[in-house]
Image (spheres, rainbow, N blue to C red):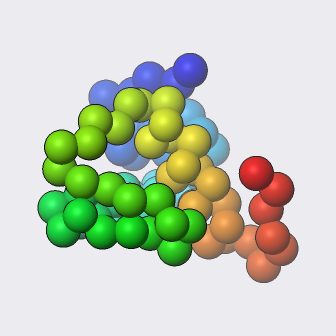
Amino acid sequence: MLIADTVNELAARLRLPADIFAEKWRDVEILKTRGGVDRYGRRFSAEQELRRSKIGCDLAADATTATSDQPQPY
């Protein structure tokens, strides 16, 4: 498990572009305030607790997809 104090630090540890990772992080925060659903069908709500490992895995997958033209295996 990777633990970081900031979004940028977590992006660096995941070896992902910090700007894309931070954008995805903000998207999840917005979805949480609105009770929204992302493009993968994951529902987010303000009451839902997101664990660091879950956030890191999901955002890493999204950021990797955003930086590649090829489908990513999950």
| Image quadrant assignment for residue 64 | bottom right
On the rendered structure, is 47 left or right of 50? left
- Give x and y (percent) for residue 58: 54, 49
Q: Residue furthest bottom?
A: 69
Q: Is residue 74 at all visible to an observer of this figure?
A: yes
| Image quadrant assignment for residue 40 | bottom right
Residue at 51% x, 66% y is 41
Between 7 and 28, the one lying in front of the other is 28
Q: Quick check: 65 above or below 48?
A: below
| Image quadrant assignment for residue 22 | bottom left
Q: What count of labels does the image hold?
A: 0
Q: Quick check: 49 above or below 45?
A: above
Residue at 30% x, 69% y is 36
- Give x and y (percent) for residue 30: 23, 66
Residue at 17% x, 50% y is 46
Quarter placement of the N terminus: top right
- Give x and y (percent) for residue 62: 58, 61
Q: Quick check: 70 above or below 1?
A: below
Residue at 36% x, 44% y is 7
On the rendered structure, is 44 left or right of 53? left
Q: Is residue 19 at all visible to an observer of this figure?
A: no
Between 30 and 10, the one lying in front of the other is 30
